[in-house]
Amino acid sequence: ERKESYHGREILELLQNVDDAYQSLIEGGKGKKGDKVTAYISFDNDVLTVANTGTAFNFESIKRLSVGHASQKGDRYIGNKGTGFRSVLNWAKEVEIYSDGYNFRYSKRFATYCFNQIDKSKIASQLNNKPNLCLPILSVPEWIEDTDDKRTEQEKEYNTVIKIIIDAETQNDKQGVLEQLNSLDMNILLFLPNISE
């Protein structure tokens, strides 16, 4: 699976997404080079939080993420077709996103629930060929309430907050969250021109 080729780069991929999203605002005339764009990273109690100022999800970007390979990124962008964001599924039990009024979650639990709502007689031939057939996790966002206990006061200062609830069983190699955070070289900001802090 393609997300495996991004294993070991999950945090970098999330930062590249922030940079690319701001580049898109610049090209759309809603941002300008040199604006302050801050990225925030925290890892506490098996929750990796990556937040940013400057950019937010909109309905179209959520749709593109859910469809996959539908990115409109051009040559000035680092990432490619949402694959980097998909790489967080290497670690995640679930992913929560709070962004400009769009509050949603991706989880295997909800994807399984949605799959179980399908009339199985309509997909009988597919199930015969692939008995473990399921819905891709990112194809079914679950809308959630943004209650006061979902984000800290500090996190509420950011336009977008992504919370990745880590499956501890995925952290047994040398490319887990702590290893990536401890080896993150701040010189990477040279290659993320839109992130200023």
Image (tube, rainbow, N blue to C red):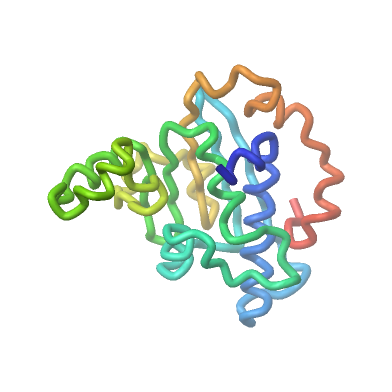
Q: Is residue 149 above or below residue 76?
A: above
Residue drawn 68% across and 69% down? 23
Residue drawn 42% across and 65% down? 63
Q: Is residue 165 left or right of residue 87?
A: left
Q: Quadrant of the N terminus?
A: top right
Which of 67/165 is in front?
Answer: 67
Q: Is residue 11 above or below residue 54?
A: above
Q: Quadrant of residue 54?
A: bottom right
Q: Quadrant of residue 75?
A: bottom right
Residue drawn 71% across and 66% down? 77
Which of 130/170 is in front?
Answer: 130
* Place of residue 128 in the rendered image (x, y in percent of width and height, measured from the top left): 25, 42
* Place of residue 30 in the rendered image (x, y in percent of width and height, measured from the top left): 61, 78
Residue at the farthest bottom position: 29
Residue drawn 82% across and 55% down? 191
State how many labels appear: 0
Q: Is residue 174 above or below residue 48?
A: above
Q: Is residue 126 left or right of residue 28?
A: left
Which of 173/14 is in front?
Answer: 173
* Place of residue 20 in the rendered image (x, y in percent of width and height, measured from the top left): 67, 63
* Place of residue 167 in the rendered image (x, y in percent of width and height, measured from the top left): 47, 25
Q: Is residue 115 left or right of residue 92?
A: left
Q: Is residue 32 above or below residue 158?
A: below
Which of 26/154 is in front?
Answer: 26
